[in-house]
Structure formats: structure tokens, C-alpha cells
Amino acid sequence: MREESIPANVVVCSAAISGAEKGRQWAWALCLFCGMGRASITPNRITYNAVASAMEKVGQWAESLVLLRGSAAPDMITYNAVISACAAGGCWQLALGLLRELRRRRLVPTPVTCGAAIAACEVGGRWELALQLLEEAERPPRQPSPLACSSAVSACRRAGRWTWALALLRRLRRQGLRPSAAACGDAAAACAAAGQFHALPALLGQGALRCLEAVRARAAQGAP
């Protein structure tokens, strides 16, 4: 008995592309997408978002940007994927340009959007802009994502702004948010780099501080 083939349509193609995206097979996802054009199948928003997400996961920012420009009605999922891909690829100016663009389209940035944009600022060394975006993300009823907070603290660390890194952690705690281990670690690294060891107990806890002191002592003695 001959098996019947499933007719190719936008639903079938979108499902196949989503499967490739979940498997991080971006080249296969892009191949399927291009095949839709050859088969005269018009992609829908779900299709574009699936391909853009596949590009994002492997940092293929150029390809994701081309997809964005080809979409007739990109939504926040599309923009989030492309901004994240640009941030991962070190293209912070493109990422921030896309943030301005989506606002002109009267789309509302999500915590994911702000987190990706702040991560882009971190990559570009724009710590002041990272803090500005974080402040915008904190306006009620919105709440910044853990990625946004960690990226802002990391941006301060990279710029050697240890006082701002500490101020960020204090602000998060006042808001009832618990800083991630990565954020605390970045703030501690900023303080240590500036020789501000007095701030470490509150950041690391007494147990971790004793370990740090032991490591420093061994390093001073030249121990392996």
C-alpha cells in the first residue's frame, strides 16, 4: 500500500521550521524557509518568528535582520529574536536601532526586549545607556528580567564602575527583587578590581569571603 504524502502548506512548513529551530538546526530552518518561496507558499508570522528564533540561537544576526525586513508585519517575538541575535553578535548599535524602530511602530517592548537591549549595551561598553534602559524597564507595571539586571551590573563591572554596580544591587533589593548569583559575582568582581574589599562581605557572605581570603593568601605566598 503506497503511503500518501502530506501536501506542503504554510502550516506544515512552519511546523517543520519550528522543529528545526528547537533542534538548533538553523541552516535546515533557513533551507525550509527558502523552499517555501520556490513552492509558492507564502510564509506567515509564525513562520518568520520560527526562522528568526533559529537564527537567534546561533547568533546569525545578519540572516535574522534580512528576515525581519522581509516580514510584512513583524511582532514583538520577531523583534526580540533579532535584537537578541544582534546583541549576541556584538552588534549593539543595530540592536538599539531596532529598539527605537519597534517603538516607532507603537509596539510595546517586553522584559525580553529590554533584557536583550541592555545585554547589547554591555557588549558595546555603554554602561550609562544600560542603566537608562534598566530604569525604563522598572517603570510600573513592568519589571526587569533577571537578564536585564545581570547585564546592567556586568556593564558597570566592565566599565570599572563599582559604585554603580553596588547601587544597582541595593536598588533591586529595595524593589523586592533577588539579584542573581551572576549579578552578585559581577558586582564583587568590580569591587575587587577597584580594591574595594570592604564591600565583599555583604555581597558574598561570610563563608564565601573566607574562601576568597584563603585564595588570596595562597596567591600571595606563591602556592600552586
Image (cartoon, rainbow, N blue to C red):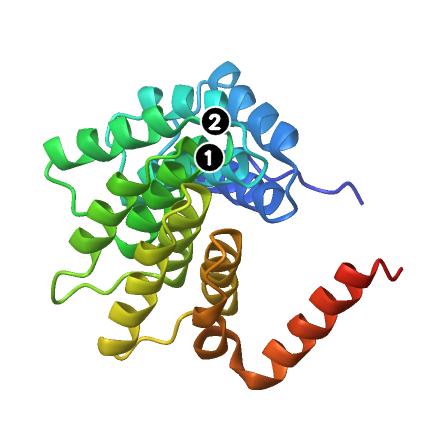
Query: Is disc 2 surrounded by few (<14), some (14 to 19) or many (20+) residues within 10 Å?
Result: many
Q: Which quadrant is the N terminus positioned in?
A: top right
Please tell me which residue is depicted at 13% across the width and 61% down the height of the picture: 139
Q: Which residue is mark 1?
A: 85
Q: Is residue 77 above or below residue 44?
A: below
Q: Is residue 64 above or below residue 211?
A: above
Q: Quadrant of residue 32?
A: top right
Given contact means CB atoms under 8 Å apart, are the residues at marks 1 and 2 in contact? yes
Q: Is residue 88 above or below residue 166?
A: above
- Horizontally, residue 131 falls left or right of residue 181, namely left
Please tell me which residue is depicted at 38% across the width and 48% down the height of the picture: 156
Name the residue type under label 1.
Ala
Name the residue type under label 2.
Trp
- Horizontally, residue 7 falls left or right of residue 113, namely right
x, y percent for residue 130? 29, 44
- Horizontally, residue 35 falls left or right of residue 76, namely right
Q: Secondary structure at mark 1?
A: helix
Q: Quadrant of residue 173?
A: bottom left
Q: Nearer the viewer, residue 161 or 37?
A: 161
Q: Nearer the viewer, residue 51 or 57?
A: 57
Q: Is residue 48 visible?
A: no
Q: Which residue is mark 2?
A: 61
